[in-house]
Image (tube, rainbow, N blue to C red):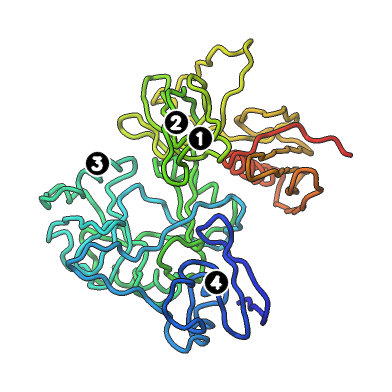
Amino acid sequence: MPEIEDGETAEVKGSAAKPYVLKNTGGVYSCSCPAWRNQSTPIERRTCKHLRRYRGDKAEEDRIGGELPQRAAKSADSKQTPPLLLAHAWDNCQELKDWWISEKLDGVRAYWDGKRFLSRLGNEYMAPEWFIKDLPTAPLDGELWLDRNAFQKTISIVRRQDRSDHWKQVKFLVFDAPAENAVFEERVDYLRDLFQKHGFAYAQALDHQRCRGLHHLQEELRRIEALGGEGLMVREPGSRYEIGRSSTLLKVKTFHDAEATVLAHQPGKGKHKGRMGALSVRLDDGTEFSVGTGFTDRQRETPPDIGSRITFRFQELTDAGVPRFPSFVAIHTETAATSAVKTSAVKRSSMKASSTKTALTTKPAKKAKPTAGVRSAKSTQRYFELVDGKSNKFWEVTVSGSDVTVRYGRIGTDGTSKPKSFDSPAAATDHANQLIDQKTTKGYIECAVPSPS
């Protein structure tokens, strides 16, 4: 594991926008995260998940002279949130070879505390006695699942208070053992042995497989989505079960793009007070809903005009045809000559089939709209900028054969370049397209490639 020398610092990515700073001062290790800062123990005995992730559990145990602190157990008669491990979204950049892949289940997250099922918010799911019969007293982390594309039906069953026979349609699919003080592979072996030995009627362990690389990840994602699945979850090999959001657990999903008309601006609350909080929008089929994420601060201060068209990204449609988890992507900037609203009608059926991604083209246009498909090219260069009240930076990607070079930095500077090689030109192009999709989601706008100075 890496070490921080006396007087030096290191950065670790966490749930905040900026990375947390780890520091070693005369053998006293600290972290800038709130979890380390708010502990009541002496500073030399404090630790946190960022220090543990960077230095390793064993090094931290040796340093503080004892077992790592655990959260207090939850009392059976209190409503407290269970100590769950939560995922980050994959950034399309991190290498996932040798990580563990499993299907991202479109069910209801459930924590078995040894006696009952609890939701993420600490609410009890009233499972019948015959459903939980013979389940172990050890905590299990999993999902109450009925079938793919059956999320709403699953919800309607598990939220009932009558412990009905509808539960016979549900399975408890288990993907982790939170109480096992072991690395992920050992926890999976524990679950496999547990379920092979007891054979629970309504519970089973979820399968995991090693990721062989980017192509394997993409193939598995396409396979699961073709079956109606939601996406993939990937776990870092050798990782521990952490409480809270962790970069050792990532979700990988394909999003769909569609268009909508802006109906109104909803006022913001909290940190967005005084500016736009969300857009009320309408699909071409008349479905109305709100889009509240994906905006930069500048876009919230000067939101899209009422009546304008926007592109948004979503995961899937509910049974009522409403997009789930919609996120703003871009404003349509068509000229008067082409302002007739395009009839790429966002009907329920066509939306389910659509999956447009910004792909590489040979001639980028200023503020180009996302294009579908991938064109092969010997050398392709794309340039993007993000300019708002807090940012003034550029991002550029160049594909040359099997090589991808990313250059980024403040506008007006040469920036930093990072090259990466792939097995084939197709793999390089796929990687670049994923990076472009990530950047446009964050608000980057494509511009003409600057001429060399």
Q: Nearer the viewer's eye, disc 3 or disc 4?
A: 4
Q: Is residue 265 above or below residue 123?
A: above
Alpha-carbon span between mark 4 and mark 1: 34 Å
Residue 357: image x %, image y %?
58, 35
Left or right, 410 with reference to 332: right
Q: Residue furthest right?
A: 453
Q: Which mark is residue 153?
A: 3
| Marks 3 and 1, the one that precedes in the sequence | 3
Q: Are marks 2 and 1 in contact (CB under 8 Å)?
A: yes
**What residue is shown with label 2?**
279
Q: Which mark is residue 31?
A: 4
Based on the displayed image, in which of its 4 quarters is residue 25 positioned? Answer: bottom right
Alpha-carbon span between mark 2 and mark 1: 9 Å
Residue type for callout 2: Leu
Q: Is residue 68 above or below residue 123?
A: below
Based on the displayed image, in which of its 4 quarters is residue 329 positioned? Answer: top right
Alpha-carbon span between mark 3 and mark 4: 44 Å
Alpha-carbon span between mark 2 and mark 4: 38 Å
Alpha-carbon span between mark 3 and mark 2: 29 Å
Local crowd size for mark 3, using a 10 Å CA cut-off: few (<14), some (14–19), many (≥20): some
| Marks 4 and 1, the one that precedes in the sequence | 4
Residue 75: image x %, image y %?
22, 71
Name the secondary structure under disc 3: helix
Residue 11: image x %, image y %?
62, 66
Q: Are marks 2 and 4 in contact (CB under 8 Å)?
A: no
**What residue is shown with label 1?**
328
Q: Residue at x 69, y 46 (%)?
A: 428
